[in-house]
Image (cartoon, grey):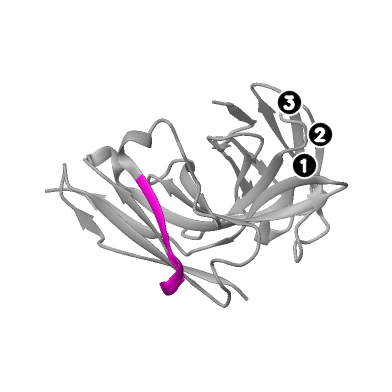
Amino acid sequence: DIQMTQSPSSLSAFVGDRVTITCRASQSISSYLNWYQQKPGKAPNLLIYAALSLQSGVPSRFSGSGSGTDFILTISSLQPEDFATYYCQQSFSTPLTFGGGTKVEIK
Amino acid sequence: QVQLQESGPGLVKPSQTLSLTCTVSGGSISSGSYYWSWIRQPAGKGLEWIGRIYTSGSTNYNPSLKSRVTISVDMSKNQFSLKLTSVTAADTAVFYCARETLIMIRGWSYYGMDVWGQGTTVTVSS
């Protein structure tokens, strides 16, 4: 199985801050990396697919980068509605695996 | 707009079989290049992929659950289903169904889970 490791596991930031979340795969997954946002009591929501493509309807303050084993999700200017947990997920091979999540709190 | 809705018992006894159904509305489960997946999330924990079924009927399962999992599709009802046998308290979780959509980028195929059900909580307890 491909292990996905996210860091940090949690962070606290001010509205307007630039936030970055890192995801590392245990082996190369090319660009087969998706990012999801999950708010409490809700299902995850696809933000980024193929490492850097923005899903339709997702605000442009979200962006993704990376390939191979190292990936980054960036929120360019954190908004109050961005309070959530973020997960990376590899779609390179089955079993599909998710990172452990990064909880983003607003200061 | 496609929507997914999970249904099934919220309480299952240990050693019994957990059965859930995901009903697809707003589109046909048999059209397009989609995988139909099940994912679970224990309370306060992360996401675990259980398995998926393709439009053709082929399946992929998580090896950690493979001996206990069956995913099937009923085209006539526009539904796909999950059966998980011999459940224990460790199987208590919120269960989600999701659609994985094929996205072609410069000739390469990528899949992302772009539509999710709202989730259903299943508790395993006597």
On residue A69, which mark appears? 3
* Nearer to the camera, B114 or B24: B24
Please determine if labels 3 and 2 lie on a single subunit: yes
State left or right for residue A64 relative to residue A7.
right
Residue furthest to the front in view is B56
Q: Which residues are magenta?
A: B70-79
Local crowd at mark 3 within 10 Å, few (<14), some, or many (≥20)? Answer: some
Residue A14 seen by the camera = no
Residue furthest to the right in view is B106
Local secondary structure at mark 2: strand
Q: Main secondary structure of the magenta part?
A: strand
Residue sitting at x 48%, y 41%: B46
Local secondary structure at mark 1: loop
Q: Report the amino acid beneath label 1.
A: Ala
Residue A67 in magenta?
Answer: no
Above or below: residue A82 compared with residue B69? below
Residue sitting at x 33%, y 59%: B20
Q: Report the amino acid beneath label 3.
A: Thr
Q: Identify residue for label 2.
A: A66
On residue A51, which mark appears? 1
Measured from the top left, where is residue B95 in percent x and y? 40, 53
Residue furthest to the top in view is A27
Which mark sits nearer the N-terminus, 1 or 3?
1
- Please say if the residues under marks 2 and 1 sit with CB atoms less than 8 Å apart: yes
**CA–CA distance in space, label 3 to label 2:** 8 Å
- Name the subunit of mark 1: A
